[in-house]
Every structure is written in structure tokens, then in C-alpha cells.
Image: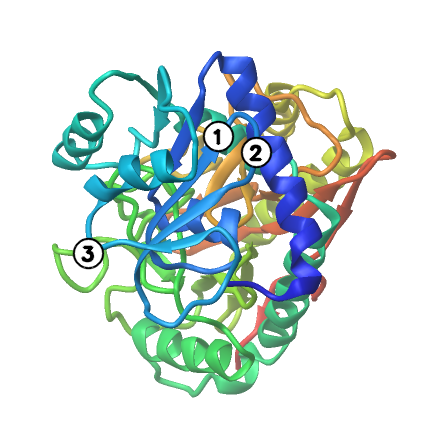
Amino acid sequence: MYAENFSNEIEIRKNKIQSVIRRSGADAFLINDNVNLFYTSGRVFSGYTYIPAEGEMIYFVRRPVGLLKENLIYIRKPEQIPEELKRLGIVMPNVLLLENDSLTYNESIRLSNIFPEAKIENGTPLIREVRTIKTPYEINLIRESAAHHSSMYRKAPAVYKQGMSDIEFSIELERLARLHGSLGLVRIFGDSMEIYMGSVLAGENADEPSPYDFALGGAGLDPSLPISSNGSIMRPGNTVMVDIGGNFTGYMSDMSRVFSLGEIPEKAKEAHNVSLKIQSEIEKIAKPGIPASDIYDLAFEIAKKSGFEANFMGHRQKAGFIGHGVGIELNEAPVFAPRSKDILAEGMVFALEPKFVIPQVGAVGIENTFVVTADGIKKLTQCEEDILPLN
């Protein structure tokens, strides 16, 4: 199921998960979500990972055929899991964790009925907690993704052609990302969180509200996916914010950069510089032990004192955060919001995105991916941060 040199990494992850299982008072965790299957095995498959509080993880696989790995058992349906556990001499759990935040109602009922004697509890917050602190192996994968991501962004101005619409520019950027190795899929945690590869916001479209909990919205091309580019022509005097997701290794990096068409108003330039100042000041104080809410408060105060409170994190509709964790998904912990309970810890990886929307002009600001080290935070996404002209 995974390369032999990956086995130590899987053992580390197993031990972390088992630690929170025991702490919760549960006996086992049955995992079904693709993100957590990938985390516990190194690949996505159709099936389940069964993690007892002690002992080895067991992979119950339906598809694909032909996987070879110790502790892998092929099944046709989940109802076979208890009989296979008994065959292996494993005691049935009294308390079983399920991913109730991602399972459908029917899936949850079905799995509960398979273990009728067990008390079912929600394990989603626990597995998200485990995934918050990245191992060195995971950080290297995010660093690799960030390097490809940064290289792709450096070439973004070269794919622009005068008279392009925002969606035409987005298509060229998406192609550029794929040529740099992007897997094309942006995994996002949260209810109804959908986007195709990323977001390109030109001019006034940056001020269009979206139903999704992203930093900025955009009307989109159709009411079935109301986010990002809306097909408008990119015009002189406007900014273009590019926020294409960086999934090059199965682990995400996240970054935004701003481009301009012709001369843009001084107010937009000033707001962008405030974003850079916010990032710089946060880099000075962010370290293990700092509350994520303090990071947000610092950013808000700088925006307020600079006279851009009304434009901070949106104009017509505002986002209530300035950053979020990244890993296998976007929107992992920590969350940088006023009431966040998250505390920075070594091994966390997050995207910081202080942004502003200037009406009739567009979005400005910055987004980079950082890793928390023992001494502070280190930027992983590296390319020009000033507003770059497209013409």
C-alpha cells in the first residue's frame, strides 16, 4: 500500500492517533474519509482504516484490486469488518469513534448498526487535532508543493494577453499549474466548500459576495458554483488577484499575488502596502505559544490605524479570519480569527492572507504559507510580493 521507506512515517501517525483515542476513552477509530485514509495509509482507496487504541492498524479495502500490504483485508461491504476483527482475535470496541462530521446520515447509521454494542462518538475533531501538527515528512511535502507553486506564480505574467477575460486568464494559469505538476484537486474542509483549482478575481468582481467561507468571493460563471471569475474583461485601472491552490504532492500550499492593468489608484497601492506591513509584523511575533486570536487582533489594529478598516478582508461582505491551517486540506487548524482558541505550536503549517477590497478597483493583499518552527515562523512560498503589471 505504501513504500517501505514510508513505514516509519505511518508508525508515527498511528501512534499520534492512538494517543488521542486513548485520551478520549475510546477503544477504536473507524476511518472512511478520503483525506484520513490518505493520512493513515499513504494513498486513497475505497474502504476503511480500523485503528485500535493499541496494536496495528487494519486496512479494509473494497477498491482498487491488487493492493499488497500487511494488515490489508479485502471486503465487499463494511458488514464484514466485525467478523474479520474476531477472526484476528481483536476484541469488539465498547466505544467507537467515527468521522461524523464527514459521514452522511445513512453511512453513520449503517456503521453504527455494524457495531450494535458500541457507543458511537465523533472522532473528527480528534483526527483534525492530530493532523494539525505536521511531521518533518509532511512539512517536506508542503515545502515541495510550495516550491512548485512559487515557480508557477513567477511565470504568471507571461501567460497574460491583452483583452483577456478573467476566465481566460484563469484557464491559462490553471494550465500553467498543471504543467508544474499540480494534481488539479483542491481539498477543502467545511460545509459546501467548493472551488475549481483556485480563484482569479479581476476588478469589481472581487467585491461580489459569495456563499462560501473564503477570504474573498467573486460571482463565478454560474449560480451552481458562485465563486471566482465571472467572465468579465480585465480592464485598465483594475487589479487582478490570483489565488490558485497548490496541490502538487497531496499536501497543499496556499498563496495569492496581485497584478495590475495600467495605472491603478494610490489607495489600492497603499492598501497593498498595509497588507505587507501586517505580514511583516506578524512574522516578528508569531511563534509557539502565541494565540491565533492575537495574530488576528494585530492585523485588524494595523488595518484600522491605517484607515482601511472598511476594506479589510472584504468590503460588501467580510471574512472573519485572516488565515487558516493547510495540509492535506485547506481550512485545517489553526484558524486566525477573533474568537479562535488555537495556540501556535511547532509543526503547524498555515496560510496568512491579509487582504483588502477597493471598490471599482479590485482586491489587493498577500497570502503566503508558513511553517511554525521552535524560533518563529518560516515562509515557504517565495516569489515577488509587490503588485506586478500585466501590460
Rendered location of residue 347, percent (x, y): 72, 38
* Residue 83 falls left or right of residue 151: left
Q: Are marks 1 and 2 in contact (CB under 8 Å)?
A: yes
Q: Distance between the residues labelled 1 and 3?
A: 40 Å
Q: Mark 2 points at which residue?
A: 55
Whether residue 381 is visible here, answered yes or no, is no
Q: Is mark 1 on a helix, strand or loop?
A: strand
Question: Foreground residue, 54 or 334?
Answer: 54
Which of disc 2 and disc 3 is earlier in sequence? 2
- Residue type of the residue flagged with mark 2: Gly
* Vertical order, 95 against 48 (above or below): above
Q: What is the crowding at mark 2: few (fewer than 14 residues within 10 Å), some, or many (at least 20)?
A: few
Question: Foreground residue, 174 or 88?
Answer: 88
Q: Is mark 3 on a helix, strand or loop?
A: loop
Q: Mark 3 points at which residue?
A: 225
Q: Mark 1 points at which residue?
A: 52
* Residue 362 falls left or right of residue 132: left
Q: What is the crowding at mark 3: few (fewer than 14 residues within 10 Å), some, or many (at least 20)?
A: some
- Residue type of the residue flagged with mark 3: Leu
* Vertical order, 312 against 208 (above or below): above
* Vertical order, 237 against 310 (above or below): below
* Vertical order, 257 against 90 (above or below): below
Q: Which of marks 1 and 3 is in front?
A: 1
